[in-house]
Amino acid sequence: MADKIIPVQNDGRVRGLDWHWHLAQSAVEVDTTELEFALMRTFEGFGRWQSECLASVCDLAATGPENALLHIIRMNDRPKTIKDLARLTNRDDVPNIQYSLRKLIGAGLVLRKGAGRSGVTYEVTEEGLRVTEDYGALRRRLLLQAVANVPGFSERLAEATRTLNLLSGIYEEISRVAATHRRP
């Protein structure tokens, strides 16, 4: 059987498929919805990557967000407060952040220092330092080498970063607007 050629439009969509549904009626709505689904899939794939990479260098079964907290705590080799961690991760679920911190502390990767509401900071332990170094080395060997093999990908990553940062601000603003229109 011969391969069937599927006609594709200039925007990459297959002709004849219905791209309109309850979340997307116009072309810009379709594009926005496609981006949102791509973000969801990317977030899930990124979380799996983080978990697998960490599992390759230590015995901790951590989620992507827990792994991110470990690396953010290590960032710039300076202790971080919960407020710092929430701001740097754009999260407001402090109880979940605290749970993740207890898990990282229990694994011997993070140390809690200080007392009181504003005097508590978190930093990586010697084991946390080793794990984050090993993670970084494996990340360079696998992820960054794969990225480097895609021509022009560095420029695409820079543009994607700018776009995602802009989109993050838009989502933040419209979430505040939506909160003012919440049903009682």
Image (spheres, helix red, strand yellow):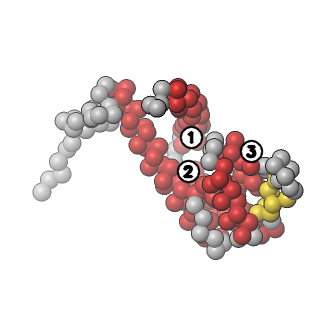
Residue at numbered disc 3: 83
* In-image side of 8 versus 181 (left or right): left
* In-image side of 112 versus 181 (left or right): right
Residue at numbered disc 2: 147
Residue 105: percent from left, percent from top: 74, 66
Contact, mark 1 vs mark 3 (Cβ under 8 Å): no
Contact, mark 2 vs mark 1 (Cβ under 8 Å): yes
User: Which comes sooner in the sequence, label 2 or label 1?
Assistant: 2
Q: Tell me the SS state at disc 3.
A: helix
User: Which comes sooner in the sequence, label 1 or label 3?
Assistant: 3
Residue at numbered disc 1: 157
Contact, mark 3 vs mark 2 (Cβ under 8 Å): no
Tell me the CA gap for discs 2 and 1: 9 Å
Of discs 1 and 3, which sits in the foreground?
Answer: 3
Residue type at mark 2: give it.
Val
Given residues 182 and 72, the one toward you in this image is 182
Image point 69% across, 41% down: which residue? 87
Q: Residue furthest front?
A: 184
Residue 71: percent from left, percent from top: 70, 55
Q: Residues within 10 Å of mark 3 (few under 14, many from 20)?
A: few
Q: Tell me the SS state at disc 1.
A: helix
Q: Is residue 5 above or below residue 31?
A: below
Q: Quadrant of the N terminus?
A: bottom left
Image point 48% across, 26% down: which residue? 181
Of discs 3 and 2, which sits in the foreground?
Answer: 3
Q: Is residue 7 above or below residue 140?
A: above
Image point 21% across, 38% down: which residue? 17
